[in-house]
Amino acid sequence: MSGFSWIACCGFALLALAGCGAPPAPQPALAAASKSAPAVDQVNRIVERYWDEHLPADAALSPQFLADSLGIERRYLAEIQSVARDGLDAKSRLSYDIFRRQREILIEGFTFPSELLPIDPFGGMPQQLVAYAVELAARPSTDAGEYENWLRRIDDYVRWTQQAGANMREGIRRGYTSPRAVVERMLPTLERLGLDDSANVFYGPLRSLPNGMRSAERARLTRDMTSAVAERLLPANRMLHDFLLKEYLPRARAGVAMVELPLGSQWYAYRVKRATDSALSPEEINRIGIAEVERLGPPPAREAAGPPANGIENAYRELQTQVQAALPTTFAEIPKGEFEIRAAEWLSPAQPLYYQRRGSSGSPPAVLYVNAGKGARAAVSIASFLQQGVPGQHFQSALQQERADLPRFRRFGHEPAFTEGWGLYAASLGEALGVYTDESAKLEAVSAQLRCAVALVVDTSLQVKGWTRAQAFDYLRLHLGADDLDAQALIDSYVASPGDALACMMGEMKIRALRARAQQTMGGRFELRDFHTEMLKDGAMPLDILETKMKAWMDASK
């Protein structure tokens, strides 16, 4: 996820749309007319109107925004529930089930005040803005509109910092504060992003203005962008940094468990349900994690690999070429859209790769960032590439977005357990693709599985079993072989986004179980390529809906 900070009231990137205001007025005539239309047409109209009307989480997270969002979600849930599901064909029934489930889970999330805890040092608003600035600097455009959009995003971000501060003050008043460890990890990032230095990443788009742009336009944009960054964006980061350091940190929680918060136990159970698509309790998932860690065994010992002679970025491009050539052996359908591989110095040292999926408008494009920062791993991680790139998360996301016959909420949607689970499953395909050519590479795939299995244990133990940070640290050292830096980063990521780390293992276990069932049901007629096609052709979806779909496919094969 590749990881994102997920706001419970919405499921979309915070900067996806500038200038969101009040929702448009309902259209009762259209809604009434749709009820008399065939059920399939009703579903199509409802989901497309929703996509046009829904409020991607804008930069404010204000009370008005939250009320507007909840109103839209409730209205569309009522509309979809009014459709006779029995009158739908299989394709529309799938859209109906996914759409209804998403509305239900989002509405449930409004019970919990996520807006009062807006800080995420691993994938929050500042990191999203950094990624956008890096992207614009790397792909300069002669279209002034691209830079106007950058200016709007700066304004949105500044408003977000102001609202985030107001929300955190309200959180202090109501007893909802972030753990100290999360705040302390955020402070160096904001300090770095607030420096008025020519090397600041936010000046990148300014430095990359193309010479082909008209001189008057170039001069205007230079002036406006310089002013926006120097006079609004950087001061906003400095103000947020100072607020966190001086006002918020002294009142932040010493502990790490959500159960310390009002409604904390229910809130964590909700996050677990959202991440895993299951009714399993945190305690049950903890037991599953312990069993998986035992099944996978002790952490595999690997020899330290030296840096590739041709540079880490080029080495990943060569790996991409090798994997792409082998894909037809295990996949019948391959996405047409490519993704770029770029070096990044802003990633955490414990994060070898970071995948950014393509936006719904095509901008930003899909990018796999390779950590080239100080202290980053110098060797290529084949398993990480398979997991986040091809045939993992990028492969799945690109296929989904290229399916023009899917409604937009499915083409550009995201289901954590499916997406993360598919990525982990894809890491196991390295031998079939011919890239796990030695024992060390195979051990990487085991390590990827073990990392996600350990997350089941540590995340739930921190939240519901009263584990201290020291206990979590010892467990990571013992069962994952993590060094101090990696272990501390993992613990902080679990604490910053409780429950999110459960998605990859729970999703992968479901995919693995479905493959085993298909092999048993179909016997000699089982083809791995066909299984992969059926898994991916309808896009990401909740795991129980996926299981029903795959069972129907298996039964039809008889």
Image (spheres, grey):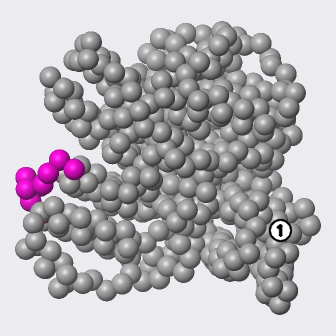
Give left or right: position of 384 versus 105. Answer: right
State which quarter of the image contains the N terminus.
top right
Residue 526 is at least partly visible in this image:
yes
Which residue is depicted at the point 81% across and 85% down?
214
State which quarter of the image contains the C terminus.
top left
**Residue 508 in the image: above or below residue 12:** above
Residue 465 is at least partly visible in this image:
no
Which residue is depicted at the point 72% across and 53% down?
186
The one of 44 and 472 positioned closer to us in this rendering: 44
Q: Position of residue 253 (x, y in %)?
A: 62, 50
Q: Is residue 84 magenta?
A: yes
The one of 403 and 153 positioned closer to us in this rendering: 403
- Disc 1 is placed on an element classified as loop
Q: Quadrant of residue 443?
A: top right
**Residue identified by numbered label 1:** 208
Which residue is depicted at the point 49% across and 44% down?
335
Q: In which quarter of the image is residue 162?
A: bottom right
Q: Is residue 482 magenta?
A: no
Q: Where is residue 33 in the image (x, y as percent from the top left)?
A: 13, 79
Label tally: 1
Give left or right: position of 100 versus 64. Answer: left
What's the magenta region?
Answer: 83-91
Q: Which amino acid does label 1 sit on?
A: Ser
Q: Position of residue 266 (x, y in %)?
A: 37, 47
The one of 495 and 299 positioned closer to us in this rendering: 299
Give left or right: position of 434 versus 380. Answer: left
**Residue 25 in the image: above or below residue 295:** below
